[in-house]
Structures are given as structure tokens and as C-alpha cells.
Image (cartoon, helix red, strand yellow):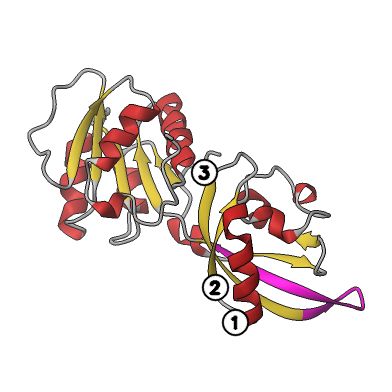
Amino acid sequence: MVDEEGSDPAALDVPAFGIHDGATMVECSPELARMFGYASTGDMIGHPPLQFVDPAHRDQSIIEVMSKGGGPYSSVGLRGDGVRFRIEISAHAIQHNNSEARLVLVRDMSPKALVVDDNSVIRNLMTLLLHKFGYRTIPADSVETALRLFRPGGFALLVTDIVMPREPGTELAQRVWLQDRDLPVILMSGSADPPRITGPNSCFIRKPFGLEELWSAITALPGRARAGLVESPLH
């Protein structure tokens, strides 16, 4: 799942909706389908709503619904590709086609990562790798674009290439730290030497690398980089 280039990070926090009759989903928004990794709303309609909740959390979700009614309550969603991610759900009784139904509003609570690389292939690959860990990703092709998308406190992680045409990734790291000094940063390069600015909130990883190397880099950073993740897929 690759997020759209230049997406507004705030738009990812808007809840998506679905409607179920207690047994199956009867309607859902395109945003909900995308959130759960499906190409169309038809991939969700007709299936039990609990199918989209991680099996280990289904009983707890039922208890939450029974005790809290409309919510909101926390659970763990299950995407079509098997990736688990944290969600927040609220539900409301409605009439749908003259029958009783439930309107559910679902908010994706998984952490956001800002991914910056002028090479679209590398940028998309990084997005896919981070998605496997449970991140929502905002891609950017330059320091300028990344700064336009950046929001202090809005990201759990910044991953940026060092060598880029106009400004280097080290400059981006320095500038975002002026606004959010605790933001964890992964600096990556296939040719440059490790930068001198690496410290407790940053680390360096050399291209090419795989899933295990990326996870090792993430776990070397402060806990903010992993806050909100369900688990590592490396098990």
C-alpha cells in the first residue's frame, strides 16, 4: 500500500465509515476499504464486521461494544494482506433501508512515517517496507516537499535519503529538529559516509538493505519510533 504523493497528513486522521446489520457489512466508504487494504468497497461488503478485527482482539471488541455502546474504543484491525494495525471505533444505531443497522466510524491509529527520497522506486519501496511494520506513510520527493508536509508532533519517524539534488537529507533533519527536537530520524545513503549529526534520535543505514536491517535501525531509535505499532513482523 503506497500513500499518495503529497498527501495531507491530517487527512489520514479523518475517520472512515461503514454500515453493518449486525451480521454483515452492507455499506462502506472507499476510505474504509483503503484503510483495510482493499481495492474497492465491494471487497468488504457482505462480510462479517469482525472479519476485519484481528482474531486475538475480537472477544475484547465484543466486550467493548457491549459495555461502552457507541464508544469510542480501541481495537486492532486486520488488513487484507495480514498486517495488523491499531484502530479506534465508535458506533451509532441508525436506520438503513428501513431496517436497524449500526454506523461505525473507524480511525486508523497506527503511527505515521515521513519518507523522503528523490528516487521514486526507492521511495515506494521504503513505503512498502514500512507498511509491513504497520506504519502509515507520507512520501515526499524533496526536502522542500517534506517541510511542507511536516507537522511537529505529527510523525513517529522520519526516513530520508542523504544525497538529493537540491538539499541533503541532513539539512532536512536539522530543520525538523528545530520544530520537533525528539523526532526519530533514519538517514540512508548508498554512497555517502555516515553523517556526523547522528545521535540518540537518529541513526544511519546504508543502501541497499532489507526488512531486518530496517527493523534493526528502527529499534535502535527511541521508543517514539515504535509507539502505536502492534508488533514486528520478524517473528
- Label number found at residue 68: 1
User: Which tag is nearer the camera, tag 1 or tag 3?
Assistant: 1
Q: Determine whether the residue tagged by mark 2 lies in a helix, strand or loop.
A: strand
Disc 3 marks which residue?
Answer: 3
Position of residue 59 relative to residue 220, above or below, is below
Relative to 213, is 142 above or below?
below
Q: Position of residue 130 (x, y in %)?
A: 42, 39
Residue segment shown in magenta? 94-107
| Element on which disc 1 rests | helix
> Which residue lies most toward the right here?
98
Q: Which mark lies nearer to you, 3 or 2?
A: 2
As measured in the structure, the alpha-carbon distance from the residue carrying label 1 to the one carrying label 3 is 33 Å
Q: Amino acid at mark 1?
A: Lys
As shown in the figure, which amino acid type bears the numbered disc 3?
Answer: Asp
- What residue did someone put label 2 on? 73
SS class of the residue under badge 3?
A: loop
Q: Is residue 230 left or right of residue 209?
A: right
Earlier sequence position, callout 1 versus callout 2: 1
The answer to if 106 sits in the magenta stretch is yes
Residue positioned 20% across, 59% down in the render: 179
Quadrant of the image containing the C terminus: top left
Where in the figure is residue 153, as x and y percent of width and height?
Answer: 30, 62
Apparent side of residue 25 relative to residue 61 in the rendered image (left or right): right
Question: Residue 126, which numbered label?
Answer: none
Residue at x 58%, y 59% (from the top left corner):
57
Answer whether residue 34 is magenta in the image. Answer: no
**What is the x, y in percent for residue 108?**
52, 59
Q: Nearer the viewer, residue 72 or 118?
A: 72
